[in-house]
Image (cartoon, rainbow, N blue to C red):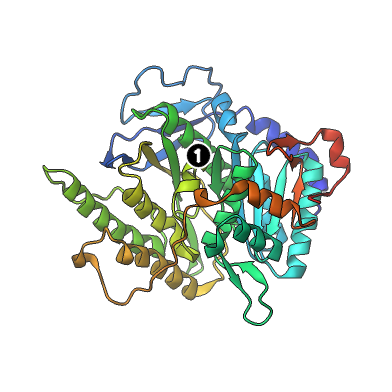
Amino acid sequence: MKPAALLPLALLFHAYSRCNSTRQGVNSGSARIGNVEVHKTSKVIELDAGHIGETSDCSEPIDKDSTFAISQDFLHDIEKDLAIVIPCMDEDLSVLDGVLEGVPHDSLIIIISNSAEANFQEECQFLEEYCNSTQRAAIVVHQQNPRLAWAFENAGMSALVEHDADTHTPHVRHGKGEAMMIGTTLAHLSNKSFVGFIDADNFVAGSVLEYCKAYAAGIHYARHCTDSDDPYAMIRIKWNSKPKVRDNELVFEKSGRSSRVVNHWMNRLFSYLISTAHSDGAGRQDIIQTANAGEHAMSTALALRILFTSGYAVEPYQLIALWSYFNTSSHTVQVLQIETRNPHFHDCSKGDGNIQRMQAGGLGTIYHSELTPPGLRDGWLAGVTVYPPLSDMDFDVFRKSVKGGGGTMKMFGIEWAEDGKVKAKAKEDFERLWIVME
C-alpha cells in the first residue's frame, strides 16, 4: 500500500499523539564513575499521562521512587531537535513503512541503507512518496556510496573507509556501527542537538513511537531533573519483552539470549570499577540492563566525542567508552535506562549465528577494554575495530565534498545551505518530490 493512501489515518494519529504527555517512574538508584552517572532502569508508567501544564520543569525536587509526568510541550521541544537514524539492509518495505510511521512528525528521519542496489532504489522511491504525503523531512544515503566514502576521507576520517582490492573504489566499511557514524554525521550537519537509533526490522509502529517518546522524556529528565549542570544525555531502551513462538505458543521473553550474557559480564566489570573508584568499596552492581540496547539516543555533542566500533559491538562498547574517556570530562554524562511497555516484535529469521555475533561483539568489548582486570578475561574473544571520534573530522570539508557529487544522497524537506545553515522546505516545495544535492 502506498504511503499516500494512509495519509488521512496518519494525520489523525499524528493529531492524537501530539496531545500526549508521558509518565515514567523515577528510580532512586544510580552509580557514578567519575562524571558518568548510570541510573537504574525506570519504567514507562503511562503512555498518555493526560493534559499536563508547564509544571514539570523540575524547578522543585522530585521525590525518588515516585513517578514523573512530562508534558507534550517538553516532549515536542526535544522531538523537533531530534534525528532518528535507521540503519537498513534489505528490509521488507511494509516493515520499514511501520518504522517510519512511528517516528514523531517533527523529528528528522535519516535512513542509512546497505541494501542491494535494486532494493535501495525502492527504498528511495518509498521514502520520496512518504515524505511527500506527510510533508516531513528525511535524508537517505547508501552506506557503500563511493562519494560518501571520499567525503569522509577528505574530512580526515579515513579509518572508516576501505578500498576495493580490484577497482580501488572507496566505500565505508560494512557494519551497524559504521552506519550509526554516518547517521550521526548527517544529524550534526542538519543542526540536530540529539540523535537516536532505531532498527529497521521492528514490526510494530507503536513501539517505535514509544521509543521516541522515551528518548524525549529521558533527555528532558537528564538535562533538567538531575543534579548535573547542562549534562550530556544517553538514553538506553530496555524492551518490555521480546516475544518468541515456542511450542506453538507466543512466549513473552523478558530478555534476549545475547542481552542476558552481555549484561551479566558488563555488570561484573561495572562492579569492579565501582569498587576501585570508591575507597569504602562497593558490592555487586546489577544496574546495567541495556548493554546491548539497539534502541538508544544521546546528545549529538556526546555522539561526536564518544568512540564507535564496528558491527554489533557498538552498543556495549559505548558504555565502556563513557567509563574510560568521560569519567574525568568537564561535562557530566547522565545515562538513563528506560523500560518501555510495548513488546518488541522484530525479524527473528536471522538465525542463531546472528545471536552469536552479537554476543561475541559485546563480550569482545569487555575483554579488550583496558579497564577489565585479568580475572574477567577469557582467551577466545575476538577484537573489535574502534574508530576515532567524529569530532576529529572537518565537517565543513565533508559537507562540501558530499554536495559536490550530485545524487550522493537524497534529501526531502530540508537543505544544507552554503553557509552551513539548515533550511526547512516550504510546504509548496513538497510538490517537487526529489530534492537532490547538486
Q: Which residue lies furthest to the bottom in this view?
A: 166
On the image, the x and y values in percent for residue 29 come to 28, 38
Give residue 65's quadrant in the image.
top left
Q: Look at 36% across and 48% down and name the residue there.
A: 322
Q: Which residue lies furthest to the left in this view?
A: 280
Give residue 278's quadrant in the image.
top left
On the image, the x and y values in percent for residue 35 come to 31, 39
Question: Badge 1 is on which residue?
Answer: 214
On the image, the x and y values in percent for residue 85 come to 60, 50
Q: Look at 52% across and 36% down and name the residue there.
A: 216
Q: Is residue 269 above or below residue 385?
A: above
- Mark 1: which secondary structure? helix
- Number of numbered callouts drawn: 1
Whether residue 143 appears in this view of the structure is yes
Quadrant occupied by the N terminus: bottom right
Q: Is residue 231 left or right of residue 121?
A: left
Q: Would you call the spot at circle 1 few (<14 residues within 10 Å), some (14-19), or many (20 or more)?
A: many
Q: In this view, does 331 lie above or below 181?
A: above
**Amino acid type, residue under disc 1 in the picture:** Ala
Q: Look at 74% across and 59% down and name the residue there.
A: 123
Residues 251 and 315: in front is 315
On the image, the x and y values in percent for residue 209 come to 59, 42
Q: Is residue 140 above or below residue 414?
A: below
Q: In this view, does 328 lie above or below 271?
A: above
Whether residue 204 appears in this view of the structure is no
